Image (spheres, grey):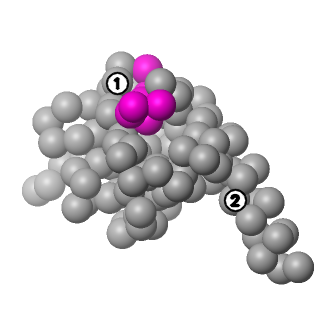
Amino acid sequence: MIDAVRGGAVLALLALGGCSSADALRSDLTVAPTSEGLDIVPTGREIGFGRFQPGVIEAVSRVFGRAPSRVLGRIDCPGGSMTEVAWPRDDLMLYFAGDAFVGWQSGDASAGRVCRRSTA
């Protein structure tokens, strides 16, 4: 019974994040950052800016096959505080303002709102 409830919750989170449960079981999926958010390749599905944080994290985690290795809540950034969620092995950081997905950074590339903190 608990597994059925947990499975239902995962399906709900995947739907919010832009992936279906069938997509989450595929090993050929990749995350492709775009100017509007993230594309799940080759499905044609997207996770656009403004999506609900738990759904985005769950969907990206399912594609990568692992949870983020770093979550920094309430970091001070120019323009306000944000949450940073990172998959360093996959060179991807996601940014959230409140519960909304607002930006991503991968290497020197980024889109949306990101936190460019001083490293000094």
x and y, in percent, of residue 43 in the image = 47, 31
Which secondary structure lies at badge 2? helix
The three-letter code of the residue at mark 1 reads Thr
Which secondary structure lies at badge 1? strand
Foreground residue among 63 and 36? 63
Q: Which mark is residue 10?
A: 2
For the stretch drawn in magenta, the main secondary structure is strand
Q: Quadrant of residue 31?
A: top left
What residue appears at the point 47 percent right and 24 percent down from the top-left corner? 44
Q: Which mark is residue 57?
A: none
The three-letter code of the residue at mark 2 reads Val
x and y, in percent, of residue 73 in the image = 49, 61
In this view, the residue farthest toward the top is 35
- The stretch drawn in magenta includes residue 87: no
Taking the image as drawn, is residue 88 in sight? yes
**21 versus 70 height, above or below:** above
Foreground residue among 73 and 6? 6
**80 versus 46 height, above or below:** below
What residue appears at the point 41 percent right and 63 percent down from the top-left corner? 65
Q: Quadrant of residue 107?
A: top left
Magenta-colored span:
36-43
x and y, in percent, of residue 112 in the image = 39, 26
What residue appears at the point 75 percent right and 50 percent down from the top-left corner? 12
Residue designated by label 1: 34
What residue appears at the point 29 percent right and 48 percent down from the top-left corner? 92
In the rendered image, the quadrant that contains the C terminus is bottom left
Taking the image as drawn, is residue 17 in sight? no
x and y, in percent, of residue 83 in the image = 48, 52
| Neighbourhood count class around disc 1 (C-alpha, 10 Å): few under 14, some 14–19, many 20 upward | some
**62 versus 52 height, above or below:** below
